[in-house]
Structures are given as structure tokens and as C-alpha cells.
Image (tube, rainbow, N blue to C red):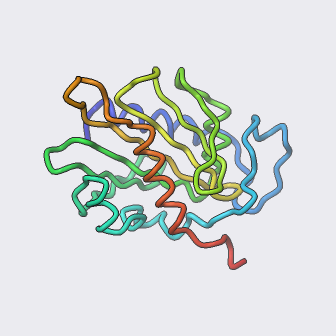
Amino acid sequence: MPVARVVVLLLLIGVAACAPSAGPGGPTSSNSRYGAPLPSAPRDVSPLSGDPCGALEPSQLRELGFTAQGEVVVLPTNERSCEWRGPDGSPHVNLGIASDRDILVDTYRVRQLAVFRPTTVGGLPGTVEQTADGSISCNVTVGTAEGQGFLVIYDAELGVDGQPLDPCGRATRIAEQTVAGLAPPFGK
């Protein structure tokens, strides 16, 4: 994993881990959400916490231009992420799973990147973030349930004109496919 990617991933997940969280299903006050909306149709991300590489089917990965084999990365927070690369090493995507804390609330609280856009991904609340408009990298954070969520970091390849090939659109597509594979939470 490139050093810059490790630093960004650690900052986004590690710093956010310091935020208080009520945990799955626990009550929170609206003030403790820092403006982050609650999912109205929650989904359970915890089955992916042990194997985030299982979030996408090999056919979905090939369609997105990635090798079907992902590599699990254990972060210093003990959370797991999966890293996929294209055949030539680029593009690059990382999917980090936060099954025991509200990563969307953490993202709203920290707002580390210059571009911060609230969005909806597969019917769930999320954010799209970049260091600057037109950046080669894009982060999409999704709140799957109160106290749970995931983060997609996508580094795009450059087109023939030298511009990145839609990293936010591609990160959002990966996030939507991840949401589509999630079950309703906690046996509901």
C-alpha cells in the first residue's frame, strides 16, 4: 500500500476512532451526531468486518476494472479493510469496515478534507470528500446503521488528457454495490 494511502486511511479511520460512539442500536442525541443523518433503512455491515474483501463479487470487481483478488489490511484500530488494484496497479480502491462505531458521525465531526458533500448512497446517508475538486482520489463514507458504516477510498487512473477518470463516481458506484449486498441489521 503506498505510504500516502496509508497516511490518509489512518487519518480518516484512526482519528475518527477517537470519537465517542453509542455502538450499534444505542441511543444518541442529535447533538452528538454533528449533523450526520441517521439511516432510515439501516443495513448491517458487521458480517463484512472479518472479510471486507467479500463485499463485492468477482464479476463486480472485473466490471470495475479490478483484479478479483483483494488483500485484507488490518488497521491499527483493529478494523479491517480490503484493497483492490487494477491489472497495472492502477486504479486502486480500499474499502474499510467500521462495524463498532459510527464512521459517518466521525466524518461529519472531523471534516478533514476541503471538499465535503453530503449524499445518499443506496438509500443510506453518506459523504463524498476530496482534498480538492478534480483530485485523483475520492473518499465516500456511508452510515449503514447507527454505530456502523464503511469508507471507500478510490484512487483513479488518469485519462489521455491527464485528468482523473471520475474517482467520486467510481467510489460511489463501489459504495452502492456494497450497500446492495448488506442485510437489514440485527435480525430485523
Residue drawn at (55%, 44%), measured in percent from left and top? 141
Residue 127: x and y in percent read 59, 39
Location of residue 117 with respect to 141 vertically, above or below: above
Q: Is residue 59 left or right of residue 34?
A: left
Farthest residue in the left direction?
88
Residue 132: x and y in percent read 46, 20
Q: Quadrant of the N terminus?
A: top left
Out of 118 and 112, give the one closest to the viewer. 118
Q: Quadrant of the C terminus?
A: bottom right
* Snapshot quadrant of residue 10: top left
Q: Is residue 53 left or right of residue 133?
A: left
* Snapshot quadrant of residue 29: top right
Location of residue 67 with respect to 162 vertically, above or below: below
* Snapshot quadrant of residue 26: bottom right
Farthest residue in the bottom direction?
187
Residue 80: x and y in percent read 42, 56
Out of 79 and 66, give the one closest to the viewer. 66
Out of 183 and 71, give the one closest to the viewer. 183
Q: Is residue 25 left or right of residue 113?
A: right
Residue drawn at (66%, 39%), measured in percent from left and top? 19
Residue drawn at (76%, 41%), measured in percent from left and top? 33
Farthest residue in the front direction?
161
Residue 5: x and y in percent read 34, 35
Residue drawn at (48%, 66%), measured in percent from left and top? 48
| Label tally | 0
